[in-house]
Image (cartoon, rainbow, N blue to C red):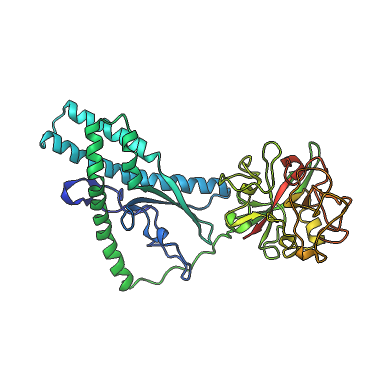
């Protein structure tokens, strides 16, 4: 991260050192390839911004970490750290103004000064606990960007809960929070003006050095998959950004050919007890390399969902065929969120054309087993629900689509939305 000059805030509120209220890990000066559509928040970077609402933004990024769950968490932490640096200046400015107003400019050591120092620590700690990660962006070169956000309105609304601050301090913060934020905005505008001018009339630059080959955003490797307590098999794993590979932990374990299967992924996952494959996403990151899922859908990456979560057979038929489904990986099983019959009597499939069929998600019993891809899946008594004679399921009527354990399911079939 580059170091920027210090800026003196208008009105003598504080001094920002080392880009504390400037840009964090922005890429504005980098030699990025032309044609890449960067989100506006990545280009702006960290700072205090106005508009419809006043907010603090922190932008963090990371590259070179192969474990995408760890990389994402690192980018999140760096974004939070950017806000912490900005807010350190903001809170110090606010409290110094308060101190000046109560001591008439006498900054000698006193009980009042000690009180203000403690107030800064309390105010910062309690406010920063409200920082939220608002967005992520995945650069084609594998760099992950995270945007942290802290709303000024939420800050002032929560002041009444900060019992450690006395009433006088809380009232002062409530009345002056917006003014100090505007001071930071002005400093941001001063820095933005030279940058905008440089973009309009960029200075001549020496010829750039030959570009180094970019590291592939997606990588393929071999790993062992445990089929049971005693048997393992070597499978191909595709690692990359979750939004690309389709799995929340950044690792696709089935349908490894991204060119052939750009919208279908098999993702290993675990969860506790028996749950419904149609349970909604909770937003909690999970997967084979991270930890158990609160819901099976959480194993699917951003912009992906559990296949057939609405019951449509076409969800699978449009993405794969019977043979590809059966050999989705060298081992294992991956399930969709639909049982394999329309009713729990006989082999009732509904519409004559398979592509027009839609199946419920039964709890257990006849025809309740979910549709499945992978060598560990099997064919039941009704094998024609999707592909005639070759419709595979997670065998065992004691656990259906709506009540299935991770051990029976194995993994999840995720479809790109």
User: The C terminus appears in which quarter of the rendering?
Assistant: bottom right
Nearest to the observer: residue 316 or residue 330: 316
Nearest to the observer: residue 344 or residue 140: 344
Q: Residue 337, how many percent across, how many down?
A: 71, 51
Query: Which residue does the image show at 83% across and 56% down from the upper left?
Result: 391
Vertical position of residue 202 compared to residue 162: above or below: below
**How many tags in the picture?**
0
Vertical position of residue 229 compared to residue 60: above or below: above
- For this view, does 316 lie left or right of residue 185? right
Query: Which residue does the image show at 44% across and 62% down from the upper left?
Result: 39
Q: Residue 197, how many percent across, how many down?
A: 28, 69
Q: Residue 264, how many percent across, how many down?
A: 69, 59
Vertical position of residue 31 compared to residue 136: above or below: below
Q: Residue 369, how many percent across, how many down?
A: 79, 47
Is residue 202 something one can see in this rendering? Answer: no
- For this view, does 204 lie left or right of residue 398? left
- For this view, does 322 lie left or right of residue 76? right
Nearest to the observer: residue 65 or residue 40: 40
Query: Which residue does the image show at 18% across and 52% down from the upper left?
Result: 10
Q: Answer with the quarter of the image where residue 294 lies.
A: top right
């Amino acid at each position: 991260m580059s170091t920027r000059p210090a800026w003196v805030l208008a009105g003598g509120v504080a001094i920002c050192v080392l880009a504390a209220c400037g840009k964090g890990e922005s890429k504005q000066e980098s030699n990025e390839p032309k044609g890449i559509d960067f989100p506006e928040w990545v280009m702006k970077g960290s700072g205090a911004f106005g508009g419809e609402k006043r907010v603090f933004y922190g932008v963090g990024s990371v590259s070179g970490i192969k474990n995408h769950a760890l990389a994402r968490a690192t980018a999140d932490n760096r974004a939070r750290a950017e806000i912490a640096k900005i807010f350190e200046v903001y809170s110090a400015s606010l409290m110094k103004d308060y101190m000046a107003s109560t001591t008439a400019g006498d900054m000698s050591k006193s009980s009042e000064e000690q009180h203000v120092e403690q107030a800064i620590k309390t105010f910062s700690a309690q406010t920063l606990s409200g920082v939220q990660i608002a967005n992520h962006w995945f650069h084609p070169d594998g760099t992950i960007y995270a945007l942290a956000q802290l709303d000024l309105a939420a800050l002032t609304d929560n002041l009444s809960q900060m019992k450690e601050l006395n009433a006088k301090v809380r009232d002062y913060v409530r009345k002056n929070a917006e003014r100090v934020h505007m001071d930071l905005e002005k400093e941001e505008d001063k820095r933005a003006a030279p940058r905008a001018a440089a973009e309009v009339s960029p200075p001549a630059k020496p010829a750039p050095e030959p570009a180094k080959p970019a590291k592939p955003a997606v990588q393929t490797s071999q790993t062992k998959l445990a089929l049971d307590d005693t048997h393992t098999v070597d499978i191909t794993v595709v690692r990359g950004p979750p939004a690309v590979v389709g799995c929340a932990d950044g690792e696709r374990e089935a349908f490894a050919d991204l060119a052939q299967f750009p919208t279908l992924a098999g993702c290993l996952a675990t969860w506790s007890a028996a749950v419904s494959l149609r349970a909604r996403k909770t937003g909690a990151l999970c997967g084979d390399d991270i930890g158990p899922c609160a819901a099976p859908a959480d194993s699917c990456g951003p912009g992906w969902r559990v296949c057939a979560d609405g019951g449509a057979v076409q969800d699978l038929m449009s993405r794969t065929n019977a043979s590809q489904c059966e050999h989705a990986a060298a081992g294992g099983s991956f399930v969709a969120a639909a049982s394999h019959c329309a009713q729990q009597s006989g082999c009732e499939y509904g519409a004559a054309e398979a592509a027009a069929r839609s199946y419920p998600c039964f709890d257990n019993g006849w025809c309740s087993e979910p549709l499945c891809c992978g060598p560990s899946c099997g064919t039941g008594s009704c094998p024609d629900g999707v592909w005639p004679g070759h419709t595979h399921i997670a065998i065992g009527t004691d656990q259906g689509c709506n009540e299935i354990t991770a051990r029976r399911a194995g993994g999840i079939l995720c479809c790109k939305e």
